[in-house]
Image (spheres, rainbow, N blue to C red):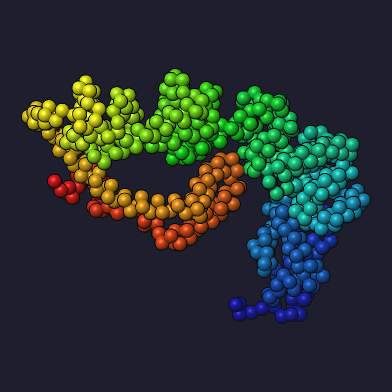
Amino acid sequence: MSFCAFSKDYSKRSFTSVENEFITKYLPEAGGDAVRAYLYGLYLCNCAQEFDGESAAKLLRIPAKKLVDIFGFWEECGLVQVLSRDPLYIEYLPVSAAVGKPKPIRAEKYLEFNRELYKILQRAGKDLRPYEHQRVLEFLENTPMEQEAFLLVVDYCAKKDGTRLSSSHILNKAEKLAKSYKFTYEQVEAELADFNVHEKELSRIFTLLGIFRKPQDGDYDLLEKWEKAGVSYAVVYACCETLKKGSLATLDSLISELIEKDATSETDAREYLARREELTSIVFKVARKLGVKVQNPRPYAEEYAEKWTERGYDEGSLTLVATLCMHLSYGFSEMDSLLDEMYHGGIVDEAGVREYCNARDRQLKLIGSIQSVCGVIKKTKAALDMVAVWRSWNFSDEMILEAAKRSATASSPLPYMNKLLSEWKRQGAFAPSEIPERETAAAQKVLPALKSEAALAADARSERERFYAARRQNAMRHVERAQAIAARDEEFVRAESAIKKGEIELAKAEIFSPETLPEIEARVEEARRARAEALARLHLSERDFTPKFVCTKCSDTGFLPDGRACDCYQK
């Protein structure tokens, strides 16, 4: 603090300096309260005493909020800098450095306009700040738009936005009209009437899609884009009904797809959308059976589902084939190849497909039995075909398993089984009692002597694989037991089904209706809680569905994560 100061009497006799440029350039165009606030603030800058914004507002008989707005106006003009609004703290700038300049506006020219403007604003429960009002008047000075036409714009925006009304929206709408050379009351009225028609259509679109916000200017641009592309509102509504829920961006993507497919008439659009929905349903159901996660179903529908249905395969048949393909670890492309083979073999109708899948299922079960005897055998289509051939030779499952037992030590069990069954067919042996044991024994004695080092190594590898296969089978027994118990409980089955269904809905929602994700996630979470409660009632836990491997290092596979053989193997 300085060691000396002016006395109060001296301060009273002092003067506040106001730059002449302020008087000539700003004072004539500013309101009375704005000038009073500016001069009093300038005076306080030269005062040594503490004086806050609330005290200044009370002394000037100006509401504190309005005082803040006034200094916001002066900030727009470049005369001050508002460093803080609460508490109010202002820094005055040199008038000569100011870049803003209020446009010379004759107040009497806008007396009637101002009265009507504030009536509209009052109905909307809104008020304009001084600098906002200044921008409105500057717009009218700089454009030939009639005052009555501008008031029509204000009334339109007030009805549309309500308490969210802003001067920016009013001026943006007016500027857009001015760019279209709409200046008179009649022109603006006709244009806004057209906007209102669009608003009605957009409101219906929002209702169909479950959108609850107010329309924005960009939304009207989309309507204009669709209209220019020759898409009628009936087509747009049809798209909304297909989506049920979603955003305008999702709707625009679907309409663009219709335009790409040249299906812009209502009839063509509805046919395409119905077909699209059918194919999408097939893609998701097939994907669920295959265990494949599909983000965007359209490529799968166009490449696979459309071809399958055109060949006569219905949803039920495709689900049966997908279940079979799941057991074979197939994806969409492998399933497509299988369906090609079935189609060329004349297997198309549901009865034929069901018979084919049932036959393959029996073959898969037989391969599972062979696995329990011979160790690891891949469930491939080639293996299924081989089993089908053996059965066509009139061999029973009992004889096929007998051949499996005698081939258990072979490096390649299936080819050796094929050799044995071929010999038995030639010899007419179709029952275990008819097998010529002497020849078989002789063959078994001679067989090891004929093996090469590579064959012996392959046998050792096969033995190792059988060792680990047996371990894994033991580890899975308690899991299969838990699954069997849970599968008999209706509440668990319903919860499990709801979880799977919800996961498919989540995948669809990520593409078509992101705003529904929270609702679907809540349903899935509820289903998971129901599943947990069912498990607790059955005295089961998630651990019961996890295999208990003997070796935790390799999980009974024989190989460590880095690819090296595990040391847990016991000959």
Residue 302 x %, y %: 53, 27
Up-down relation of residue 260 to residue 519 (above or below) = above
Question: 377 and 272: which one is in front?
Answer: 377
Question: 194 and 388: which one is in front?
Answer: 388
Q: Residue furthest front?
A: 433
Asked whether the viewer can see residue 278, the reply is yes
Measuring 72% from the left and 70% from the top, which residue is drawn there? 53
Residue 341 x %, y %: 42, 22
Q: How many marks?
A: 0
Question: 254 and 530: which one is in front?
Answer: 530
Up-down relation of residue 491 to residue 254 (above or below) = below
Question: 558 and 473: which one is in front?
Answer: 473
Asked whether, in this view, residue 228 is left or right of residue 362, the answer is: right
Asked whether, in this view, residue 471 is left or right of residue 489, the answer is: left
Indicate the quadrant containing the N terminus: top left, top right, bottom left or bottom right.
Answer: bottom right
Residue 45 x %, y %: 70, 68
Asked whether, in this view, residue 401 is left or right of residue 232, the answer is: left
Measuring 65% from the left and 41% from the top, which residue is drawn there? 244
Location of residue 548 (image quadrant) = bottom left
Residue 363 x %, y %: 35, 33
Up-down relation of residue 249 to residue 64 (above or below) = above
